[in-house]
Image: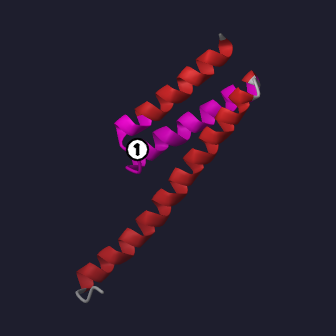
Amino acid sequence: MANHPSALKRQRGNKKRNQRNASCKSAIKTHVKKTITSIEEKDSVAAKASYKQAVAKIDSAVTKGTLHRKTASRKISKLTKKINSLAA
């Protein structure tokens, strides 16, 4: 347990950031799953709509520092390939 005031403050900040990051990552996973299920059901309209939301969530996670930019790029790339295979 931290005793120094600055360490206690750091602990509080870490807890807040941890909750924010977990929430953001959970939302990303939810949108990606929605996109994948839409693709599996061959519903191109719903897939494109959920794809757009998923990409927006992933991009915002990068700007907030929750995800690394290359991780985000990889996730978006995988989704894009799946969306394009639906159109083909």
Whether the magenta-drawn stretch holds residue 54 is answered as yes
Q: Is residue 71 left or right of residue 3?
A: right
Image: magenta residue range: 45-72
Residue 69 falls in which quadrant of the image?
A: top left
Q: Is residue 75 inside the magenta stretch?
A: no
Magenta portion: prevailing SS class:
helix
Foreground residue, 5 or 47? 47
Residue designated by label 1: 63
> What residue is shown at x 37% (from left), y 69% (from top)?
14
In x, y percent, where is residue 5? Answer: 26, 85
- The answer to which quarter of the image holds residue 31 is top right
Quadrant (top left/top right/bottom left/bottom right) for the C terminus: top right
Question: Farthest top residue?
Answer: 88
Image position of 6 with respect to 54: above or below: below
Question: Vertically, is 64 above or below 78?
Answer: below
Q: Residues within 10 Å of mark 1 (few under 14, many from 20)?
A: few
Q: Is residue 50 above or below residue 9?
A: above
Q: Residue at x 24, y 80 (%)?
A: 6
15 horizontally vs 23: left or right = left
Residue ID at (31%, 82%): 8
Spot occupied by residue 24 in the image (x, y as percentages of width and height): 52, 53
**Residue 41 appears in which quarter of the rendering?**
top right
